[in-house]
Image: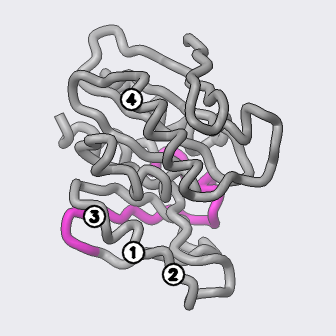
Amino acid sequence: MTVLDIETPHGPARAHVRPADDPRALLVLGHGAGGGVQARDLVAAAGAALAESFSVVLVEQPYRVAGRKSPAPAAQLDAAWTAVIEHLAPTGVLITGGRSSGARVACRTAAATGAAGVLCLAFPVHPPGRPEKSRLDELDGVSVPVLVVQGTSDPFGMPPAAPERTLVTVPGNHSLTGDLPTLTTAVRDWLRLRV
């Protein structure tokens, strides 16, 4: 694995690059608001992608690199993410995604980054207990295929089925650690269809 610090408009981001031996595509994943790239579901998804000959980049947003726990505003997250993708300069099939907040960023920037698909781990449909504050428009706004892996008792809600959206549920909550083998299989099967 190679670790790169990449300049963005909001400070350096950090990219953890795991190249496949004979890469078929590139998967770039972002972390959740309060966590890092070591989250078990992100690691499982990265392993599934590598097994399918996808190179993988796990991206730490500038606020995390700077040691802050509170996430930056959405516009800053999106700008930093887009800058990282531009720096990576993918030449083949690009799939973007992430867990929770990182999934939201990937959805909002899918068109700008040229993503051929978006992988959402624990998409936060709404804040816990606040279904009226829906973020579903971010998910619905993606025009390329989307995989959502969601915990059956996620307090952040459950997205509905939709065209071009594959929804896989696993036992448990927002952490998605209740059934990592099912998550891994879902990611592998979906990625196979993207190349």
Question: Where does the image place residue 90, in percent across and percent down from the top left?
Answer: 30, 24
In the rendered structure, are the residues bearing label 2 and label 1 in contact, judged by CB atoms less than 8 Å apart?
yes
Q: Nearer the viewer, residue 134 or 112?
A: 112
Q: CA distance from mark 3 to mark 2?
A: 17 Å
Lower position in the chain sequence, tag 1 or tag 3: 1
Identify the element where label 3 is drawn: strand
Identify the element where label 4 is drawn: helix
Vertical arrangement, residue 43 with respect to residue 157, above or below: above
On residue 134, the disc is 2
Q: Residues within 10 Å of mark 4 (few under 14, many from 20)?
A: few
Lower position in the chain sequence, tag 4 or tag 2: 4
Vertical arrangement, residue 142 with respect to residue 22, above or below: below
Lower position in the chain sequence, tag 4 or tag 3: 4
Question: Where does the image place residue 173, in percent across and percent down from the top left?
Answer: 63, 66
Q: Which residue position holds label 1?
A: 137
Name the amino acid type tagged 4.
Glu
Q: Which residue position holds label 3?
A: 165
Residue found at x 58% / y 49%: 76
Name the amino acid type tagged 2.
Ser
Q: Quadrant of residue 43?
A: top right
Q: In the image, is residue 170 part of the stretch drawn in magenta?
A: yes
Q: Residues within 10 Å of mark 3 (few under 14, many from 20)?
A: many
Q: Please name which of the two marks, 3 or 2, marks the residue nearer to the observer.
A: 2
The quadrant the N terminus occupies is top right
Lower position in the chain sequence, tag 3 or tag 2: 2
Q: Please name which of the two marks, 1 or 4, marks the residue nearer to the observer.
A: 4
The residues colored magenta run 162-183
